[in-house]
Image (cartoon, rainbow, N blue to C red):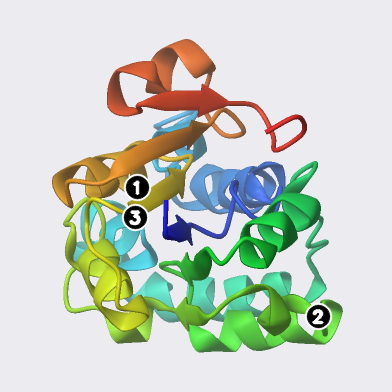
Amino acid sequence: MKAALFDLDGVVFDTEPQYTIFWGAQCREFHPEHPGLEHEIKGQTLVQIYDAWFSGPLQDKQEIITERLNQYEQQMDYCYVLGFVEFVRKLRSEGVKTAVVTSSNRVKMEAVYQRHPEFKTLFDAILTSEDFERSKPDPDCYLKAAKCLGTSIEDSVVFEDSFNGLKSGRAAGMFVVGLATTNPAEAIRPYADKVISNYLNM
């Protein structure tokens, strides 16, 4: 491994339970006929969620939800997944390049930087939704990350938790480590070369 490529939510930060709370509230308000929708949309980008569930007669609600989401993300607790900081620092000490590859936007990342001033020192590159033409499960984001770091596909390892993210890493032809932080280990196992619950004892 010469490059470790990390998704953000559910991989670097244990934020998925907080997003479930947020989207649970939005789904109950705008889609009361579809209980549990917040679990179905896990791992999808905002554009994908809007296209599938908030288009047509609900399109005018997108601006409201986006504003609520931006405010919510400013107040979120960005707690690292167990063992992550130690793991990534060990990788970097051994010459492995590291990058964040996330569908989150730069506005959210500014909130992350404020909570964690050390965050940027953990990575050689941070790629956000503004850097990609196509969203996960398309491999575009991971291929661009490897190119950005100057590493080959064969030497790059993807760390993901969502089905779309896992499929993206697979489609890029990279070794994929699945984090069982958002979905059960048995559910993501078919999409990952290795499954872990956190970074302890890696």
Amino acid type, residue under disc 3 in the picture: Ser
User: Of helix, strand and loop, which one carries label 2?
Assistant: loop
- Side of 127 where 197 appears, left or right: right
Query: Where residue 196 sits: x, y (%)?
Result: 58, 26
Dot 2, how many residues are within 10 Å of its Cα: few (below 14), some (14-19), or many (20+)? few
Amino acid type, residue under disc 2 in the picture: Glu
Question: Where is the C terminus found, in terms of image quarters?
Answer: top right
Residue in front for this viewpoint, 86 or 132:
86
Query: Where residue 109 sits: x, y (%)?
Result: 61, 81
Residue drawn at (31%, 54%), measured in percent from left and top? Answer: 155
Residue 34 falls in image quadrant: top left
Single out the mark in the foreground, 3 or 2. 3
Single out the mark in the foreground, 1 or 2. 2
Dot 1, how many residues are within 10 Å of its Cα: few (below 14), some (14-19), or many (20+)? many
- Side of 200 where 150 appears, left or right: left
User: Of helix, strand and loop, which one carries label 1?
Assistant: helix
Residue assigned mark 2: 118
Q: Residue furthest front?
A: 94
Residue 24 falls in image quadrant: top right
Please report contact status of discs 1 and 2: CB closer than 8 Å, yes or no: no
Compare marks 1 and 3 and give the one earlier in the sequence. Answer: 3
Residue in front for this viewpoint, 73 or 50:
73
Could you say which disc has been placed on residue 156 in the image? 3
Could you say which disc has been placed on residue 110 in the image? none
Dot 3, how many residues are within 10 Å of its Cα: few (below 14), some (14-19), or many (20+)? many
Q: CA distance from mark 1 to mark 3?
A: 15 Å
Residue 68 appearing in the image: yes
Residue assigned mark 1: 165
User: Of helix, strand and loop, which one carries label 3?
Assistant: strand
